[in-house]
Image (spheres, rainbow, N blue to C red):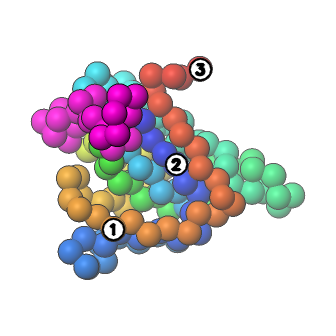
Amino acid sequence: MRVVIQRVSRASIEINQQLHAQINKGLLILTGIEESDTIEDAIWLAKKIVNLRIFNDNQGIMNLSVKEVNGDILIVSQFTLHALTKKGNRPSYIKAAKPEIAIPIYNFFINEITKEFGKQVFTGIFGANMQVALINDGPVTIIIDTKNKE
């Protein structure tokens, strides 16, 4: 699994020109699942994200997690995170998991984040054409790939 985590002051998703989800201070998590990803990857990643200390404490040091600042989480599926761009100019998405593999892992990931986080998590709709808006706070953007856990 590959995620792009953005610390945001606010973020939202529109689908068919209708507001679907929105959050204030928290994390926007763009989530890509590839064919070889497993439930174990989702468990590891959920724990890592919820406890990631990227929010400022009283001294202005990134020392607090989204849970500790009572922030929100918005998760968006994004197969393009697994784009292969080495050859030619048209990206290949062959490594991205097909929906029959990706959807169960994506749903498990959402449930695992919710369990670790202890409160409601907001999401987009898997496979939908979504318009994502965000105000990146910092900016702080972290990329995590479960294939590189070191």
Give the quarter of the figure containing the N terminus: top left
Q: Name the disc covering residue 150, or none.
A: 3
Q: Quadrant of residue 12?
A: bottom left
The range drawn in magenta is 80-105
Q: Which residue is painted at 45% across and 51% down in the image?
A: 29
* Residue type of the residue flagged with mark 3: Glu
**What type of secondary structure mainly makes up the magenta span?**
loop
Q: Name the disc covering residue 131, or none.
A: 1
Q: Name the disc covering residue 53, or none.
A: none
* Residue type of the residue flagged with mark 2: Ile
> Circle 2 sits in a helix, a strand or a loop, which is it?
strand
> Circle 1 sits in a helix, a strand or a loop, which is it?
strand
Q: Position of residue 67 (x, y in %)?
A: 58, 53
Q: Which of these two is toward me, 87 or 15? A: 87
Q: Quadrant of residue 68?
A: bottom right
User: Closer to the observer: label 1 or label 3?
Assistant: 1
